[in-house]
């Protein structure tokens, strides 16, 4: 099946696809042209707010033996961690603010407040996930290697435990993400380059030591007799951040409208076709400006996938132009309230814990392609390049 | 198990090899590795994380149109690449050796995927906050 056969835009001619691409290019050019002092002021202000919240939380925890201070401190710290991970760290590491020429706010220097080393995040997320978005067998974000999130993924009796694995993943999210780029499946199959594995394990060990030392030794020790309460409050803050980050991330690609793809050929995809795959593979959610800031503007997941290196504070404005374009070209633009988007993702997790014969697809087109093996594919397993352009087949989530 | 050429999709082990990390295939560029360098923000020569400023190595024509084919590198890696491979054909994103190698340092860059109308279907990099531009001699 060629890209032109993907049901959601089979009605578009090659010229229309390219015209859509040009219109999206123009949006990008307009934002690049207009980004400047106001955007820089936004990110600097946000970093100031985040650091103030973190400092206030840490100071409040000096009195953490007093219950109100415990909860206030934990809450402030959770908020600071959410802002740092979602709106600051994730976006800085995409290079969204590199143009400012600020030595601190730069994709090469930022190290975020979570267990995964920045370098591994930039590989597993910026490259693997953003390049192979929702491509089965490549994008490990489809179920994070432990959940079956597409009907094409072969069912295994272990999938019966998905509801439990899902709860564990949500609770321990930062630790799951920390191990994400190791590619456990490749290690299990003895396909992992030992040199790379050693390098990654060293990085993870250094980062884990730093995170644990900071949250469970240094800062609790500074509060003296409140050591245990402060350490507990820090654990609560990390837990709240874990649950929030997990929910936001699962809303990005698992609601019903977001498509999965199987690879036949990727490298000859044109820019316009790449744009289309990003639109079809992502899902937005609606909410207030505050909700969008707290979710790192990932409520504009479609816009983020179209332009991952444009400043996140501009995604709302970009969405005002992208959505009408989708309507103009008759392309689905998946969005809805946060609770509905997450509810659909959760339903998929539950349904796909069972073999396909016990459940039905929630989309009319249903799955047609054969099951794909688990784990990332090896380079040697990639198909021979095809002569024609494109080669995507799209499939529903559940 | 083939570990000699390690999986392109995996994170690189890092270090200077017989060829620059991003050099393989057409015109001295491996398109998959070019994309990996662009998105993972790793050096096209050594495969390690980039530092600030980011360096771009190219010809005077690439500097003039602010569009480079070879992915971003460390400044020191660009210097080493020109010294080691600057006189060879088809190794640093050029089918022939440029008359002069130029180095541009920048804080940020745009990664531009090839459009359908492009005759040269290679992605390009456009520095967006240039700090310095200078000549490099092999």
Image: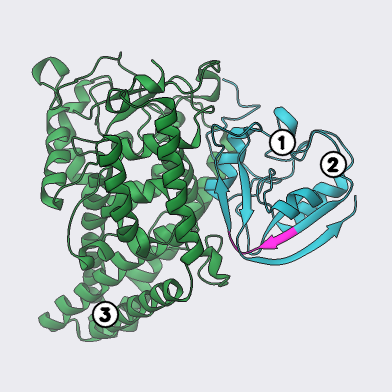
- Residue denoted by label 2: B85
- Per the image, label 3 sits on a secondary structure element best described as helix
Residue at the disc numbered 3: A57
Residue at left 68%, top 43%? B69
Q: In this view, does A131 lie above or below A262?
A: below
Residue beneath the point at 15% across and 48% down:
A336
Residue A249 visible in the shown view = yes
* Chain letter for the part of the structure drawn in cyan: B
Q: Do the residues labelled 1 and 2 touch (CB within 8 Å)?
A: yes
Left or right of A216 on screen, residue A138 = right
Residue A161's spot in the image, x, y percent?
A: 16, 32
Q: On the image, which quarter does residue A260 sit in? A: top left
Prevailing secondary structure class for the magenta stretch in the rendered image: strand
Q: Chain A is drawn in which colour?
A: green
Q: Where is residue A308 in the image (x, y as percent from the top left)?
A: 43, 51
- Residue A75 occupies quadrant: bottom left
User: How dense is the environment of label 2, judged by Cα within 10 Å: few (below 14), some, or many (20 and up)?
Assistant: some
Number of numbered discs visible in the structure rendering:
3
Q: Dot 1 corresponds to which residue?
A: B23
Nearest the camera: A244 or A367?
A367
Q: For the residues carrying marks 1 and 3, which lies nearer the camera in this image?
A: 1
């Amino acid at each position: 099946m060629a890209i032109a056969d993907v049901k959601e835009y089979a009605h578009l001619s090659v010229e229309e696809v390219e015209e859509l691409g040009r219109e999206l290019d123009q949006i990008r050019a307009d934002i690049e042209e207009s980004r400047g002092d106001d955007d820089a002021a936004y990110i600097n202000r946000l970093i100031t707010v985040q650091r103030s919240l973190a400092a206030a939380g840490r100071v409040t925890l000096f009195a953490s033996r007093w219950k109100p201070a415990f909860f206030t401190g934990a809450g402030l710290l959770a908020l600071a961690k959410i802002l740092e991970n979602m709106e600051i760290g994730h976006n800085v590491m995409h290079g969204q603010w590199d143009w400012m020429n600020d030595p601190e706010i730069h994709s090469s220097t930022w190290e975020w407040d979570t267990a995964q080393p920045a370098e591994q995040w930039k590989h597993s997320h910026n490259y693997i996930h953003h390049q192979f978005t929702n491509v089965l067998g490549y994008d490990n974000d489809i179920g994070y290697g432990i959940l079956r999130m597409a009907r094409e993924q072969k069912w295994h009796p272990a999938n019966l435990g998905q509801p439990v694995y899902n709860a564990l993943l949500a609770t321990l999210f930062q630790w799951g993400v920390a191990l994400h780029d190791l590619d456990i499946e490749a290690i299990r199959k003895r396909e992992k380059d030992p040199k790379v594995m050693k390098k990654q394990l060293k990085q993870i060990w250094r980062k884990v030591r730093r995170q644990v030392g900071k949250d469970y030794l240094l800062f609790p020790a500074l509060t003296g007799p409140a050591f245990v309460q402060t350490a507990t409050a820090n654990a609560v803050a990390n837990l709240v951040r874990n649950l929030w980050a997990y929910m936001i991330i699962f809303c990005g690609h698992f609601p019903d409208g977001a498509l999965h793809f199987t690879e036949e050929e990727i490298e000859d995809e044109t820019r316009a076709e790449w744009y289309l795959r990003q639109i079809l593979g992502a899902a937005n959610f609606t909410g207030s400006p505050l909700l969008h800031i707290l979710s790192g503007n990932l409520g504009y997941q479609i816009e983020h996938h179209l332009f991952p290196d444009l400043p996140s504070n501009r995604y709302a404005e970009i969405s005002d132009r992208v959505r009408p374009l989708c309507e103009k070209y008759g392309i689905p633009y998946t969005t809805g309230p946060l609770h509905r988007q997450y509810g659909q993702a959760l339903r998929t997790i539950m349904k796909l814990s069972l073999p396909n014969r016990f459940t039905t697809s929630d989309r009319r087109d249903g799955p047609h392609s054969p099951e794909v093996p688990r784990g990332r594919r090896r380079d040697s397993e990639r198909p021979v390049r095809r002569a024609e352009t494109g080669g995507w087949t799209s499939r529903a989530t559940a | 198990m083939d570990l000699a050429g390690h999986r392109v999709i995996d994170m690189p082990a890092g270090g200077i090899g017989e060829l620059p990390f991003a050099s393989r295939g057409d015109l001295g560029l491996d398109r998959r590795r070019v994309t990996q360098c662009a998105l993972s923000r790793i050096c096209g020569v050594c495969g390690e994380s980039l530092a600030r400023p980011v360096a771009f190595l190219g010809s005077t024509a690439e500097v003039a149109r602010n569009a480079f084919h070879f992915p971003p590198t460390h400044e020191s890696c660009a210097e080493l690449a020109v010294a080691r491979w600057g006189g060879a054909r088809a190794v640093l994103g050029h089918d022939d050796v440029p008359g002069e190698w130029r180095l541009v340092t920048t804080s940020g860059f745009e990664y531009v995927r090839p459009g359908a109308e492009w005759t040269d279907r290679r992605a390009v990099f456009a520095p967006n906050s240039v700090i310095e531009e200078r000549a490099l001699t092999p």
